[in-house]
């Protein structure tokens, strides 16, 4: 995985007004029938119903935590190429695009924790929720330690002990990081921000209805459903529209990549549902029996 995309893809900054090259299309215009069908399949997926006890909840968290990490990697790749983060600093070529991505990063990397307990990234919030529930955080921490030691991400994943289905999903996300900006933005919008409220909302409603002592995880779900649906999702739509206006020849490639990301999520959800159902009930439940 290269640190910068090749010339003519994401490395060239946006300059001038993107509206001057091609019109910005309305929300939903950069979406195909295939993308809509895949989103419906994910919204209706039975994975939330597979979380029936403490063992199933831990299985879900121990898989999904890697998705939370690679979400941040995808987001930071957009920030790297749309804003002035290099030293010496130069202005961003498209200030509105820079503002959009910086606002998303602000919330995702340093959100206010519940009960006024300070600030943290959503990934750190998720890790704390895993510890509260009693999940095994050693594999994800081993992965992070390897990254800090300079081990390439794919090698770190291979030696982490994280679930194979989650590793396959993240490997596909890492491959997207070398794609042009418009492609990454499409994957981020359709595979993440526009998807999360429906995809995780069902699990949040289920946990609210049945009761859980894993309060931090429920708070995490509620926060993502709220922010991604009301704020970040519309921001990402505007960002994608600006990027495709600058590079309309990338539209089909971007939407194909978004559909591939949704298929990868379906494969992960299928594997996760099977894993949750084969996890034996825990004798020390941290959540009430669900059903």
Image: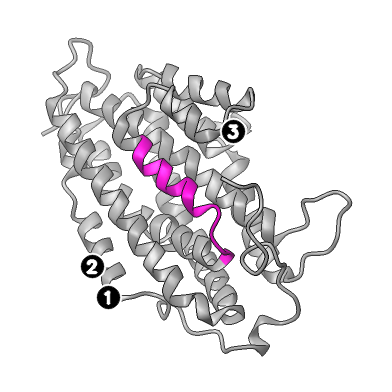
**Position above or below: 88 against 215:** below
**Position above or below: 283 against 148:** above
- The quarter of the displayed image where residue 159 is located: top left
Q: In this rendering, which labeled residue sits more in front, label 3 or label 1?
A: 1
Q: Is residue 176 magenta?
A: yes
Would you name the residue on which mark 3 appears? 116
Q: Is residue 244 left or right of residue 159?
A: right
Callout 1 secondary element: helix
Callout 2 secondary element: helix
Structural crowding at the residue carrying mark 1, measured as other residues with C-alpha within 10 Å and reported as few (<14), some (14–19) or many (≥20) = few
Marking on residue 37: 2
Q: Is residue 245 left or right of residue 190?
A: right
Q: Does the image show residue 38? A: yes
Callout 3 secondary element: helix
Q: Is residue 267 left or right of residue 9?
A: left
By secondary structure, the bulk of the magenta-drawn segment is best described as: helix
Marking on residue 33: 1
**Position above or below: 14 against 263:** below
Q: Residue at x 14, y 18 (%)?
A: 281
Q: Which residues are magenta?
A: 167-181
């Amino acid at each position: 995985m290269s640190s910068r995309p090749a010339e003519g893809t994401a490395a060239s900054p946006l300059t001038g007004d993107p509206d001057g090259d091609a019109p910005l299309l309305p929300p939903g215009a950069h979406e195909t029938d295939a993308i809509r069908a895949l989103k419906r399949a994910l919204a209706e997926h039975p994975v939330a119903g597979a979380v029936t006890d403490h063992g199933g909840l831990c299985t879900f968290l121990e898989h999904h935590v890697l998705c939370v990490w690679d979400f941040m990697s995808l987001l930071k790749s957009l920030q790297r190429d749309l804003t002035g983060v290099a030293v010496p600093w130069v202005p961003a070529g498209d200030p509105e695009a820079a503002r959009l991505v910086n606002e998303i990063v602000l919330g995702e990397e340093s959100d206010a924790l519940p009960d006024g307990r300070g600030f943290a990234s959503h990934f750190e919030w998720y890790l704390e929720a895993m510890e509260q529930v009693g999940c095994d955080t050693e594999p994800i921490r081993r992965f992070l330690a390897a990254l800090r030691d300079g081990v390439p991400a794919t090698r770190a994943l291979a030696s982490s002990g994280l679930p194979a289905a989650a590793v396959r999903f993240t490997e596909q996300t890492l491959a997207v990081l070398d794609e042009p900006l418009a492609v990454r933005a499409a994957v981020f919008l359709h595979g993440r921000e526009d998807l999360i409220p429906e995809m995780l909302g069902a699990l949040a409603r289920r946990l609210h209805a049945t009761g859980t002592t894993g309060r931090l995880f429920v708070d995490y779900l509620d926060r993502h459903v709220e922010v991604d649906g009301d704020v970040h999702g519309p921001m990402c739509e505007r960002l994608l529209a600006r990027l495709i206006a600058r590079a309309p020849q990338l539209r089909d490639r971007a939407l194909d990549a978004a559909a591939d990301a949704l298929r990868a999520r379906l494969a992960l959800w299928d594997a996760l549902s099977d894993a949750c159902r084969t996890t034996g009930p825990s004798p020390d439940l941290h959540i009430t029996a669900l059903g």
